Image (cartoon, rainbow, N blue to C red):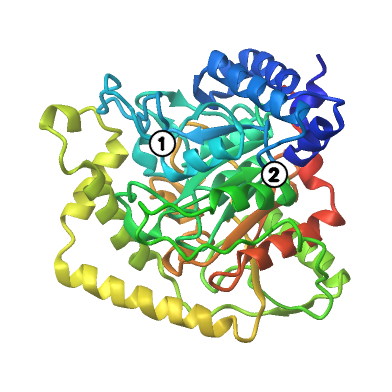
Amino acid sequence: MSDDICFMSAAEMAAAFRAGSLSPVEVTQALLARIARVNPQVNAYNLVDEASALADARAAEARYRAGQPLSPIDGVPASIKDIILTRGWPTLRGSKTVDPAQPWLDDAPVTARLREAGCVIIGKTTTPEFGWKGVTDSPLTGITRNPWNLATTPGGSSGGASAQVAAGLGPLAVGTDGGGSIRIPAGFAGITGLKPSFGRVPAYPLSPFGTVAHLGPMTRDVLDAALMLREMARPDARDWFGLPWEDKDYAAGLAASLKGVKIAYSPTLGYAKVDPEVAARVREAVAVLESLGAIIEEVDPPIGDPTDIFHVHWWMGAYNATRALSPAAFAQLDPGLQDSHARGRAIGMSEYLDAANARGRLGTAMRQFHETYAFLVTPTLAVPAFEAGRVAPKAMGDVYWTAWTPFTYPFNLSQQPALSVPCGFTAAGLPVGLQFVGPMHRDDLVLQAGAAYQAVTDWHKRRPVL
């Protein structure tokens, strides 16, 4: 069976299912065969359940034959990141400290919603331990690699998800994003990744990293992200932060024009150092937006450098995630996570409250900024993908992962929707990402902007050779 099936979008698969030219079982079988061949190279999945996936596919096939699909993505294969609860499968969080011998009786809200939509849940994708860093390797599952160059990282912490989608191992993946963990791997692996507005996609249990943590879709293109978001965003009473349910068809408005839309373009946010090739590809993408009629102004948002603010929130989250471990279990942790735990433990109440207040000022500044600008456009990342197994490029030395992600974590602090789409490649053949940041609660607008860009470019259609 041709690998072309494995690189079809979710929308294309569903259209073929409706037309009867392809079945969910055929697609699932093709993907399982490719996973068996390619996953050992990239380490995207740490769990694949063939029997369960084929049972899901057969049920979806029967629904299509009866003319009763459950949703626009019924029968489409999807994965769940391995920090998200999935009934019947262990959620090990990339950690040797989690005991797999538990009942595992619960689905997280997003898992439940995708089941209800009829998706074929193939398995779980790799993550760094407790999702603590922007690359994907862990003591439990080892190193996950970038399909565009196996010597490089696919980013993190949803790196298994990005490697899956980029390598043609499934069109839909659920990621989480507490500081860029959807957009970082989307940028490095050349796929589409949306961090929705905080609370748009219900979460349970609450992330130990608190209110910087979001869940969102990772896909080949914006249309698939829009289709997936509609199902993921359906309400769940277990999330007390959840936004009121909006019965919105995010795919319906994707043809909106950018003509006359005022966009702020910030190449550095006023403080970032950006690789020249990354900067050039993003500038070319901004020129495409201008050719579509957008009004582009080069301007930095008035937020300053929020690195210290984010570090306080993130390190306290790392401490929270690991503080109940026994000394023996703690000794098994990734040394970098142990360091983050120690940094979080050392933060006092006054320092935390100062950071919380500064976060509030940042959020206010961004809300006021969007009274003038419909979108903010930036690079997704400051660098191309670097050596797998490292937390930062070798040339940067011994730095924290936030040193090369200056464009992602500010918008976890502000909780705004932010979308990464591929916008070209470096001379070495590594993807470059373009980030759209929108006003709070306007997930539809960032999807429209990304769709407008993808309508006139084909970077999202490129695929690696594996």
Q: Quadrant of the C terminus?
A: top right
Q: Could you tell me if the residues under marks 1 and 2 are in contact, i.e. CB atoms within 8 Å? A: no
Pick whichever of labels 1 and 2 is earlier in the sequence.
Answer: 1
Q: Indicate the secondary structure of the residue bearing disc 1.
A: loop
Residue at 73% across, 38% down: 10
Mark 1–mark 2 distance (CA, rounded to whole Å): 34 Å
Give the residue drawn at x 43%, y 24%: 142
For residue 24, above or below residue 71: above
Q: Amino acid at mark 1?
A: Asp
Q: Residue at x 53, y 23 (%)?
A: 43
x and y percentages locating residue 26 in the rendered image: 75, 18
Identity, as a three-letter code, of the amino acid under mark 2? Pro
Corner quadrant of residue 313: bottom left
Which residue is most to the front? Answer: 66
Q: Position of residue 353 (x, y in %)?
A: 22, 73
The residue indicated by pointer 2 is 431
Name the side, left or right, on which 87 lies relative to 216: left
Foreground disc of the pair 1, 2: 1
- Asked if residue 384 shows in the view, the reply is no
Q: Which residue is label 1 attached to?
A: 107
Q: In this image, 421 relative to 204: left or right?
A: right
Closest to the observer, 311 or 256:
256
Residue 180 visible in the picture:
yes
